[in-house]
Image (cartoon, rainbow, N blue to C red):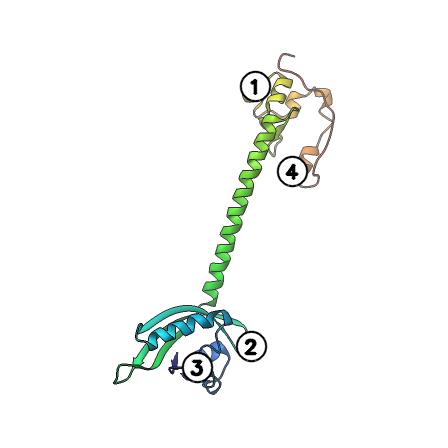
């Protein structure tokens, strides 16, 4: 809590505000609200104070960035009311100053997290579109497998190659489709990819068409 004069200078500051800003009461009496405000905030503060002096406002609430004695930043919510004299003009201002740094930082973190999520969703949609286009337009057979090695998608060239529809290929593994004598060619490779031990592998094996 603080009392401010018409020039925004501190008349009195309670212990909580002294602790928040790191200044003693005597030190704060030599400073104004502008002195402890972030440079980007001074114009807004001056404008609001002038509106109070002009009688356009009797009180205001602002959230602004203050600087403590160590020049660290403190986000504060200031609720101030004019104390007027017999003539009706403001003689001083009574202000409660609440430290909302944690709330402000949490809001920034939440905003950043939302932005990252939106970016991730956009990138996923872009990747999904590119993958879908690749699946449909590629001249070679392409399949999407789940963690167990079962076919989730098979593009048209692969369907033609194996003479089977996408529905007929769904949930089958490459071992289901390959000649039994070739199934040892890639034994364990898919599992190593799933476990992150391998990024890719390449093998040659013979597949059986539907009518074989």
Q: Earlier in the sequence, mark 4 or mark 1?
A: 1
Q: Which residue is mark 4?
A: 194
Q: Which residue is mark 3?
A: 15
Residue linked to disc 1? 165
Q: CA distance from mark 1 to mark 3?
A: 78 Å
The image quadrant that residue 137 belongs to is top right
Residue under circle 2? 70
- As measured in the structure, the alpha-carbon distance from the residue carrying label 2 to the one carrying label 3 is 17 Å
Left or right: where does residue 67 sit relative to residue 87? Answer: right
Label 4 or label 3, whichever lies nearer to me, is: 3
Q: Give whichever of 59, 44 is nearer the camera.
A: 44
Q: Position of residue 45 (x, y in %)?
A: 42, 72
Q: Residue at x 46, y 59 (%)?
A: 107
Can you give x and y, in whole percent of width and height, for residue 16 in the image? 43, 78
For mark 4, does the 10 Å Cα neighbourhood hold few (<14), some (14 to 19), or many (20 or more) residues? some
Find numbered disc 4 in the image and state the secondary structure of the residue it sits on. helix
Mark earlier in primary sequence (2, 1)? 2
**Vertical order, 85 against 37 (above or below):** below
Q: Is residue 126 visible?
A: yes
Q: Earlier in the sequence, mark 4 or mark 3?
A: 3
Point 32% across, 73% down: residue: 59
Let me know if residue 98 appears in the view: no
């Amino acid at each position: 809590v603080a009392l401010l004069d018409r020039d925004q200078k501190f008349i009195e500051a309670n212990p909580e505000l002294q602790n928040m800003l790191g200044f003693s009461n005597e030190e704060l009496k030599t400073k104004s609200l502008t002195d402890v405000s972030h440079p980007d905030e001074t114009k807004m503060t001056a404008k609001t104070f002038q509106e109070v002096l002009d009688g356009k406002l009797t009180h205001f609430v602002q959230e602004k960035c203050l600087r403590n004695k160590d020049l660290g930043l403190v986000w504060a919510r200031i609720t101030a009311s004019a104390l007027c004299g017999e003539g009706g003009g403001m003689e001083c201002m009574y202000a409660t100053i609440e430290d909302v740094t944690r709330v402000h930082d949490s809001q920034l973190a939440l905003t950043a997290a939302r932005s990252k999520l939106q970016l991730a969703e956009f990138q996923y949609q872009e990747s999904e579109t590119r993958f879908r286009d690749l699946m449909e337009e590629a001249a070679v057979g392409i399949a999407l497998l789940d963690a167990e090695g079962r076919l989730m998608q098979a593009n048209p060239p692969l369907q033609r190659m194996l003479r089977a529809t996408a529905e007929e290929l769904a949930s089958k593994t490459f071992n289901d489709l390959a000649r039994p004598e070739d199934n040892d060619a890639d034994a364990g490779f898919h599992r190593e990819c799933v476990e992150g031990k391998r990024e890719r592998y390449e093998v040659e094996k013979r597949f059986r068409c539907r009518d074989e």
